[in-house]
Image (cartoon, grey):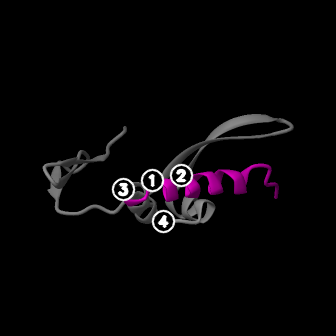
Amino acid sequence: NNKKVVEENGKWYCEATQKTYDTCRRRYILRMKIQDHSGAGWVNVFHEQACEMLGVDAEELHAMRESDPAAYERAVKRAHMSSAGRQK
Protein backbone atom coordinates (compact mmCIF):
# COMPACT_ATOMS: atom_id res chain seq x y z
CA ASN A 1 0.00 0.00 0.00
CA ASN A 2 2.50 2.60 -1.21
CA LYS A 3 0.18 5.46 -2.20
CA LYS A 4 1.93 8.73 -2.83
CA VAL A 5 1.63 12.15 -4.38
CA VAL A 6 3.42 12.69 -7.68
CA GLU A 7 4.07 15.87 -9.62
CA GLU A 8 2.38 16.05 -13.01
CA ASN A 9 2.42 19.16 -15.19
CA GLY A 10 3.10 21.52 -12.30
CA LYS A 11 0.31 20.04 -10.15
CA TRP A 12 0.21 17.22 -7.60
CA TYR A 13 -1.70 13.99 -8.17
CA CYS A 14 -2.68 11.90 -5.15
CA GLU A 15 -2.85 8.18 -5.91
CA ALA A 16 -4.93 7.51 -2.78
CA THR A 17 -7.73 9.98 -3.60
CA GLN A 18 -7.16 10.09 -7.37
CA LYS A 19 -7.40 13.88 -7.21
CA THR A 20 -5.10 16.64 -8.44
CA TYR A 21 -4.00 19.55 -6.23
CA ASP A 22 -2.22 22.84 -6.88
CA THR A 23 0.19 22.44 -3.95
CA CYS A 24 1.54 19.78 -1.63
CA ARG A 25 3.15 19.74 1.79
CA ARG A 26 6.26 17.60 2.05
CA ARG A 27 6.50 15.27 5.03
CA TYR A 28 9.17 12.84 6.10
CA ILE A 29 9.02 9.08 6.31
CA LEU A 30 12.59 7.99 7.04
CA ARG A 31 13.61 4.35 6.87
CA MET A 32 16.47 3.75 9.29
CA LYS A 33 18.50 0.86 10.61
CA ILE A 34 19.09 0.98 14.35
CA GLN A 35 21.34 -1.26 16.36
CA ASP A 36 22.81 -1.85 19.76
CA HIS A 37 24.78 -4.62 21.45
CA SER A 38 21.80 -7.00 21.21
CA GLY A 39 21.15 -6.70 17.47
CA ALA A 40 19.72 -4.50 14.73
CA GLY A 41 16.40 -3.72 13.12
CA TRP A 42 14.75 -1.45 10.60
CA VAL A 43 12.28 1.23 11.67
CA ASN A 44 10.20 3.97 10.06
CA VAL A 45 10.53 7.45 11.52
CA PHE A 46 7.60 9.74 10.73
CA HIS A 47 7.49 13.48 10.14
CA GLU A 48 7.44 15.00 13.64
CA GLN A 49 10.23 12.79 14.98
CA ALA A 50 12.22 13.12 11.76
CA CYS A 51 12.05 16.94 11.98
CA GLU A 52 13.40 16.72 15.51
CA MET A 53 16.17 14.32 14.52
CA LEU A 54 17.21 16.21 11.39
CA GLY A 55 16.72 19.69 12.80
CA VAL A 56 15.02 20.87 9.62
CA ASP A 57 11.50 20.61 8.19
CA ALA A 58 10.96 18.59 4.99
CA GLU A 59 9.91 21.72 3.06
CA GLU A 60 13.07 23.54 4.15
CA LEU A 61 15.30 20.59 3.27
CA HIS A 62 13.69 20.27 -0.17
CA ALA A 63 14.17 24.00 -0.84
CA MET A 64 17.79 23.67 0.25
CA ARG A 65 18.29 20.72 -2.10
CA GLU A 66 16.88 22.74 -5.02
CA SER A 67 18.66 26.05 -4.35
CA ASP A 68 21.87 25.16 -2.50
CA PRO A 69 22.99 21.53 -2.91
CA ALA A 70 26.09 22.10 -0.76
CA ALA A 71 23.96 23.34 2.16
CA TYR A 72 21.66 20.35 1.64
CA GLU A 73 24.62 17.96 1.86
CA ARG A 74 25.88 19.68 5.01
CA ALA A 75 22.44 19.42 6.65
CA VAL A 76 22.17 15.71 5.86
CA LYS A 77 25.71 15.00 7.07
CA ARG A 78 25.14 17.05 10.23
CA ALA A 79 22.00 15.04 11.01
CA HIS A 80 23.80 11.77 10.35
CA MET A 81 26.77 12.68 12.48
CA SER A 82 24.67 14.05 15.35
CA SER A 83 22.80 10.76 15.64
CA ALA A 84 25.86 8.51 15.27
CA GLY A 85 26.65 6.91 18.57
CA ARG A 86 23.79 8.62 20.41
CA GLN A 87 22.43 6.65 23.35
CA LYS A 88 19.52 7.22 25.69
For label 4, the residue is: 57
Query: Would residue 76 be found to the left or right of residue 25 on screen?
Result: right
Kind of residue at disc 3? Glu
Residue 46: % across, % down: 52, 55
Q: Which residues are magenta?
A: 67-88
For label 2, the residue is: 73
Dot 1 crowding, Cα within 10 Å, few <14, some 14–19, many 20+: some
Residue 69 is tagged as: 1
For label 3, the residue is: 66
Disc 4, disc 1: CB below 8 Å? no
Against 1, is 21 above or below? below
Q: Nearer the viewer, residue 61 or 12?
A: 61
Dot 4 crowding, Cα within 10 Å, few <14, some 14–19, many 20+: some
Kind of residue at disc 2? Glu
Q: Earlier in the sequence, mark 3 or mark 4?
A: 4
Residue 60: % across, % down: 43, 65
Q: Earlier in the sequence, mark 2 or mark 4?
A: 4
Disc 2, disc 1: CB below 8 Å? yes
Helix, strand or loop at mark 4: loop
Helix, strand or loop at mark 1: helix
Kind of residue at disc 4? Asp
